[in-house]
Amino acid sequence: MSVTKSLVELDNEILYSALCGGINNPEDVKHLKDLFKDATTLHYDLFTDPIFFEKKDTDSNIVIEYVLPTLKRAYSKFFINTPGIFSTSTYQNPVNTRLELYQLQFNLREFLEFLSDKFLKNYDKLNDFENLDTNSEILTLIVEDYIGSKVSYVTSVPVDEIQKEIRDIKLSRHLSI
């Protein structure tokens, strides 16, 4: 098996389909495959540091091979298995606009920059744990931190400002209001 030298090398529809296994909603599968394609073809430049291509030992994978599964994990936490705090509407917020605002917080480029930067700063923090897949654990923590930052932001927005925030985000991304 050849060693992956770039995220671009993971641009593969068969791989995308395998990574989407277990996702039942066709819209989620399509959206996630589009995100995989964009990550591998448009944002590969965020993962050029040699640390993304080094093996810690003979039994481990290189970090670049974890990027797309990590993206799937983040996507799932935004669109499939959202945090429980956003799962219900309330009297004050009957259409659950907080969930919409939370989901609008996901930005592929921003997430991949966050992932790359945090990994480069923290990749060796769990080296004392010999029986863990430390790369996978670090990436899981990075996703949780990213999710936590978005949950914190969304819950801090006053109810009467949520619609304005949603509108502003949609306008900045040229989405229909």
Image (cartoon, rainbow, N blue to C red):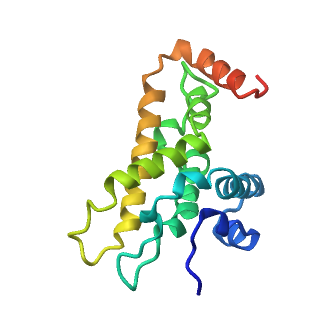
- Report whether 6 appears left or right of 115: right
Residue toward you, 167 or 95: 167
Could you tell me which quadrant the C terminus lies in?
Answer: top right
The residue located at (70%, 56%) in the rendering is 41
The spot of residue 120 in percent (x, y) is: 38, 54
In the displayed orientation, state which residue is furthest to the left: 128
- Give above or below for 32 relative to 13: above
Q: Can you give x and y, in whole percent of width and height, for residue 135 in the image? A: 39, 66
Q: Where on the picture, by quarter, is residue 107?
A: top right
**Is there any visible trace of residue 20 in the rendered image?**
no
* Quarter placement of the N terminus: bottom right
Q: Nearer the viewer, residue 9 or 22?
A: 9
| Residue 136, position as x, y percentages in the image | 41, 66
Q: Is residue 63 above or below residue 30?
A: below
Q: Residue at x 66, y 69 (%)?
A: 9
Query: Farthest residue in the top direction?
Result: 160
Q: Give coordinates of residue 42: x percent, y percent.
A: 68, 50
Judging depth in this view, the residue of 79 and 94 nearest the camera is: 79
Q: Is residue 45 visible?
A: yes
Asked whether, in this view, residue 146 is left or right of residue 91, the answer is left
Is 116 situated above or below 62? Answer: above
Q: Residue at x 54, y 12 (%)?
A: 160
